[in-house]
Amino acid sequence: MNTSPRSQARSAARLAAVQALYQHQLEGTPTARLLDEFHQHRLGHTIDDDEFADAEVDFFDDLVRGAIARGAEIDDLLTARLAEGWTLKRLDKTMLQILRAGAYELLARADVPVAAAISEWVDVAKAFFDDREAKFVNGVLDAVAKGVR
């Protein structure tokens, strides 16, 4: 596992992006205000004794902005790759944000190799869920990658 400062900063950005997208879905916070709030109060700060690692801010901003701006396109991509009978509405809200941000990274960030991106999003899933859900993230994002890369 690559634990360079840049790699850690990107991992922190991915985790924070899921939290920001979750907040956006729940509260409808406008993108600019959402990013500002995370810049001011979350990224690299301590909240309730939880230290938020220094995240790569530009990468975080791109993931959040991109996942929101291309939401309909991303949701179509994800829906096409879910098992029959499954809809995005049936997914856990956190899981949905992991998939949206991961799909955006695969769509728009050709600078990040597919295997590295998927592995990172599987790790993000493991921060919230058990191995079964992490495997689900792996499967869906692998299918997305085959379609967009």
Image (cartoon, rainbow, N blue to C red):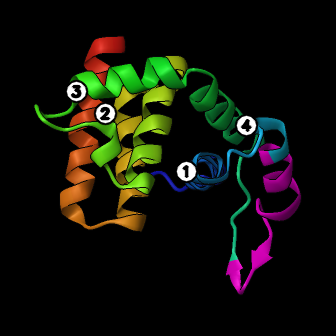
Amino acid type shown at disc 1: Val
Q: Between marks 2 and 3, how big is the CA–CA gap?
A: 9 Å
Instruction: Place residue 88 in its image quadrant.
Output: top left
For disc 2, the neighbor class at 10 Å (few under 14, some 14 to 19, many from 20) is many
Q: Quadrant of the N terminus?
A: bottom left
Between label 2 and label 1, give the one nearer the viewer: 1
The residue closer to the viewer here, 15 or 69, is: 69
Q: CA distance from mark 3 to mark 1?
A: 20 Å
Q: Amino acid at mark 4?
A: Asp
Mark number for residue 61?
A: 4
Q: Amino acid at mark 2?
A: Leu
Determine which residue is flagged by label 3: 81
Q: Secondary structure at mark 1?
A: helix
The residue shown at (50%, 37%) is 101
Residue range (magenta): 34-50
Disc 2 versus disc 3: nearer the observer: 3
Tag 2 and tag 3, C-beta contact below 8 Å: no
Q: Is residue 72 left or right of residue 31?
A: left
Foreground label between 4 and 3: 3
Q: How many marks?
A: 4
Residue on which disc 1 sits: 18
The one nearer the camera, 55 or 94, is 94
- In the image, which disc is placed on residue 141? 2
Residue 126 pos. (x, y %): 35, 63
